[in-house]
Amino acid sequence: MERREGLLLAAKDGLCPRLSRALFAIALAGLSATAPGWAAPAEKLPTITSARQAHDLTSEQARRGYPIQLRGVVTYFDTDTGTGFGALYVHDATGSIFVKLVGGAIKPLPIGSIVEVWGVSDPGGFAPIVDRPRIRVIGHTTLPNDAVPVSRTQLFAGEYEGQWVQVEGIVHSVSGSSHTVILELATMDGILFATTVREAGADYSRLIDAKVRIRGNEAPLYNANSQMIGARVVFPGLSAVKVMEPAPGEPFQLGVIPIDNLFRWDQMGAQHHRVRLRGTVTMQLPGSSLCIRDATGGLCAQTAQDTRLAPGDVADVVGFAGSENSTSVLTDAVFRKAGGGVPVAAQPVSAEQVLRGKHNSELIQVDGQLIGTDEVASDTELILASGNLIFTAVLPRGLTGPEVRAWKTGSQLRTTGICSVQYDPRMSVLKDGVAVPKSFKVLMGSPADVAVLEGPSWWTPGHALVVLALALTVTLVVLAWVVVLRRRVQQKTFLLLESEQRFRHMAQHDALTGLATRLVLQDRLNVALERAKRQSTGLALVMLDLDRFKEINDTFGHHAGDEVLRVTASRILAAVRKSDTVARMGGDEFVALLPDLSDPHLAESLAAKIVAALSAPIPFAGRDLTVSVSAGLCTALSGDLDADTLLRNTDIAMYEAKAKGRNRFEVFKPEMAHAHKQ
């Protein structure tokens, strides 16, 4: 005990300059790991005198309320974070620490103030902080020059939590409130948000499309369980922003480029900044998107601007080139009317022609038979069949009207809208990189974009009952004939209902296991991703493959294999939640979709539960068949991934589990993808 206190005092008084952060944490842990029933008085806890020591406390240690006395530079200050508390970051030679302020209890501190801080340790919402502070200003200096250059990936990994860092990127948008400014920063490895307190009279819009270097403190995003789910950078103000490359100029003075030049080799280097397109408006959802077409092709821009344009107007659109579901788009776009014109006529095409990939982002007109409506999706989605192909027509739910009641299952519909083609990445790889379309959607702007060409067949189970009633009325005079006729009609009615239910079930469920089919999984996965984007939640996929299933078939026959597949399906369903979807992808491969995840660790818990459930022997013909499963898990937060990438990553993780010995699950990590390519 005396030796542990000696270590702490040596660290406190600077007598052991080589004492590492780890040794300091061990010494603190030693004080809390004394004999049962012993508790050191609070006044005997050693005083912490550096930001690094305070930050490196464990949550349990921080909860004990260690006295803290720091001297450092103010790198961020906000009197009101919107939670009733203020925020302060103090930086010294060892690092940075967050200081929690009672809202309105302290006067504003100028950035660069040298302060002395007295307070106590607290676990904070995610990492240890200084609570109940007393602050004294003793001088003023410039912002520290030791900001660590970091990437978005490093910030999201949590290794620089709370620290004074430096990030670079191109500003895509500026938003916020009267108190706060939010910069959307496109870095080399993704989008990162940087926030600051709004300065009176400052012009932040000049930063849009500029390459900047920002110094600030990493601030975590965390959930109610104190688990990190993301990160941002809080910076003290424009003094911490250095413009590395100014915006190319007034956006609407940029040169117009053809739509089909986006993402071509000759344009790749220039497309880190905004580009300017000009085309005829084909469809608009004000405040959401604007679709245009020029002589080379079509494109939809994502925009918050709600200025209304008419179909046929010529518009200049400026934004950042990006892609969504394998389709070129403009993000953070602004636009203005450049002239009037003639509305673009929708091009009549067949579903087969669309899947040749030549009509993406174009205004098309395609016919199909309505076979169902997806009522789970946030928008109205009509599922149509054309020949052997199935596609969807999407109408924003807020734009639906009484016309929807005329869209009966079995009706022949003509849909008009913007074509959105989805590509199959695996098949594209097999085709030497040439994109292979696998499905498409028609994005519509109003109920008027749906025309009923032909109503459904009159002969339905309900009409069959009418026929039955008429037949009974006519044949009342002959009781025996009435009985015979009633029996026949009832049998036919039952067969019609049973056939309809059987065909619907066969289309959506695997014949052997009763699980959902690949098509149902794909549709529900797309719905889950869209919902995750809108609600800022997450989802996960678990892909499972039975280990050495072929040996069971070869040794005990296909009846044994079928029994193993049926039991496996039953056990997976028992292990997951009622809201989850389990599908058989083919052979001995299964996939579980886990939507609406706020906690990524729940997905790992469910994956472990499934693997454990499937490791139990399966009885067959008086013997126990030994089985196990290899599983891959991939989680997507806030819809970061598209469906194809999520499936591919889950598949990679599953093969990683097989490579590591089977009967286990592996969580997808980016390095797995690199190893898989090799």
Image: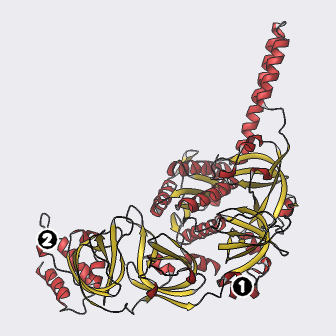
Mark 2 crowdedness (10 Å alpha carbons): few <14, some 14-19, many ≥20 = few
**In the image, is residue 290 above or below residue 581?**
below
* Residue 54 visible at all: yes
- Percent of width and height locating residue 222: 42, 67
Q: Which colour scheme is used?
A: secondary structure
Give the number of the disc on residue 184.
none
Which residue position holds label 2? Answer: 42
Amino acid found under the numbered disc labelled 2: Ala
Would residue 329 be seen by someone viewing this image from the given angle? no
Q: Which residue is identified by label 1?
A: 254
Which of these two is toward me, 217 or 497? 217
State which quarter of the image contains the C terminus: bottom right
The outermost residue toward the front is 201
Please identify the quadrant where the N terminus is shown. Answer: bottom left
- Give left or right: position of 515 versus 470: left
Quarter of the image holding residue 26? bottom left
Q: Quadrant of residue 534?
A: bottom right
Give the residue type at disc 1. Leu
Relative placement, left or right, of 526 versus 670 is right
Q: Taking 406 as reference, is 311 above or below it?
A: below
